[in-house]
Image (cartoon, rainbow, N blue to C red):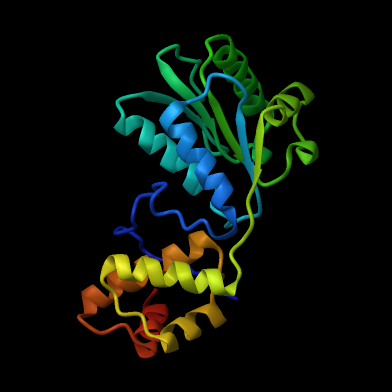
Amino acid sequence: MQQIALDIGLRTPPTLDNYFPGPNAAALAHLQQWLSARPEGAPTYVWGPEGSGKSHLLQAAVAGLRAQGHSVGFLDAETQEPVAFDESWAAVVMDDVHLYGDALQHTAFSWFVQAHALQRPVLAAGRLAPVDLVLREDLRTRLGWGHVLGLQLLDEAQSRAVLRQAADARGLELSDEVMDFTLRRFSRDLGSLMQLLDGLDRYALQTQRALTIPLVKSMLENA
């Protein structure tokens, strides 16, 4: 199956409300509680394969905290110049920890220790379970001593449900034929499905055409 790169300027920002949980309902419920209460105790670590929605959940949590007027310390594998811990942060969020090099591991550990001392919650995510992370031991064990939530990829029925839900939310008429065509040819992970649907939505608007199989083929030819 092909995973395509599209211009997704109209992409819907990640929220907990637009995360389709499928087999991950328990993780979503935990994050909803985390956002509302921001527990001061054990950290939360979310892990699972690429496309299971880890970054969606973390970005939604960050956006939710900022909407409440809080500042957040955020670190991911693409952070070039990490800043020092700021005591004004309401929480620390760290994504893609499995990709952290030495410098980011040092920053993550420092943030973790200071957040714990000030009773600020830590939310992190990676592709591997804590026991399998190839990180410095003091950071790896801290990531694993709290709430550990494993995510799963959507199966075909769940992929269909998330496409249908997202299309309905956009006012798109998504026929069974178009859904069959797309699911046979593209990755069914959550991120790819949303990227594909956003691209289809934008292309249909630009071309003033209905969402059909010829439209999908035309969009791919022009991507």
Q: Specify the quadrant of the image occupied by residue 123.
A: top right
Q: Is residue 202 rendered to the left or right of residue 3?
A: left
- Considering depth in this image, is 68 or 1 the residue closer to the camera? 68
What residue sits 54% from the left and 60% below the top? 22
Question: Is residue 32 placed above or below 143 in the rendered structure?
Answer: below
State the residue at coordinates (52%, 70%): 159
Any part of residue 5 in sight: no
Is residue 99 toward the left or the right of residue 78 in the image? right
The N terminus lies in quadrant = bottom right
Residue displayed at 46% across by 67% down: 162
Left or right of residue 139, residue 88 in this image: left
Residue 71 vertical placement versus 162 (above, below): above
Quarter location, residue 69: top left
In which quadrant will I find the C terminus?
bottom left
Residue occupying the point 60% across, 21% down: 107
Q: Position of residue 85 (x, y in %)?
A: 50, 15
Q: Is residue 201 above or below residue 57?
A: below
Q: Is residue 80 above or below residue 153?
A: above
Q: Position of residue 79 (x, y in %)?
A: 52, 33
Q: Residue furthest left?
A: 208
Q: Position of residue 80 (x, y in %)?
A: 52, 31
Res 73 visible: yes
Q: Residue 130: x, y in percent?
A: 74, 37
Q: Count the marks: how many?
A: 0
